[in-house]
Image: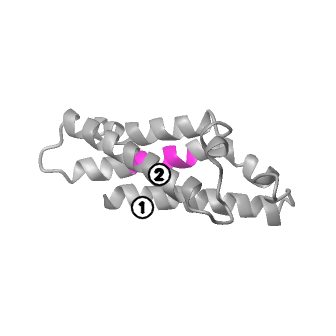
Amino acid sequence: MLWFWIAYIGATLIGMLHCIFNIYVLHMRPMDENGMGEAYEKTKPWHPLYNLILYPPAGWLYMRNLPDPTLQEALRTGLLWCGLCIVFDLIAWVLIRHPWHLSFKEFYIHYQPYITLTYLIIFAAPLIGFACL
């Protein structure tokens, strides 16, 4: 789980820093009562890329440290990582109220296709890691 959480926290921090950069350096509109604003909207296409950079190496590090890595273990790990990410995202970004909170519709409908691509990358990361052994 260490590699999953390192990738998850890393991708989240990079996304947040990208949004902050857009607000303070590029002077894009921040979030307001009407939504997340231009600064966040401009980062969304980049989110799958952050995950593509971070999760496959995490998957490789995880698979490399198993005593007997198998395709079945990579599939189980991909399902676990993706499932955890979906549940944790729901809790952390939709259910808990905070300044960067999104509604269910904003997170799962307006964030398409990027959220789906992100979850596919997370699922595939251990498979990619296994393939690279």
> Would you say the residues marked 2 and 1 are in contact, meaning their CB atoms lie under 8 Å apart?
yes
Amino acid type at image mark 1? Ile
Considering every residue shown, the one lying at the far left of the view is: 67
Horizontal side of 31 relative to 10 (left or right) equals right
Q: Nearer the viewer, residue 89 or 20?
A: 89
Q: Residues within 10 Å of mark 2 (few under 14, many from 20)?
A: many
Residue under the point 85% across and 57% down = 29
Q: Nearer the viewer, residue 105 or 10?
A: 105
Q: CA distance from mark 2 to mark 1?
A: 9 Å
**Residue 31 vertical position relative to residue 109 in the rendered view, above or below:** below
Please identify the quarter of the rendering in which residue 20 is found: bottom right
Task: Give the image location of residue 50, x and y in percent.
Answer: 56, 49
Task: Give the image location of residue 129, x and y in percent.
Answer: 32, 42
Q: Judging from the image, what secondary structure is the residue with disc 1 in?
A: helix
- Give the labeled residue for mark 1: 6
Magenta span: 49-57
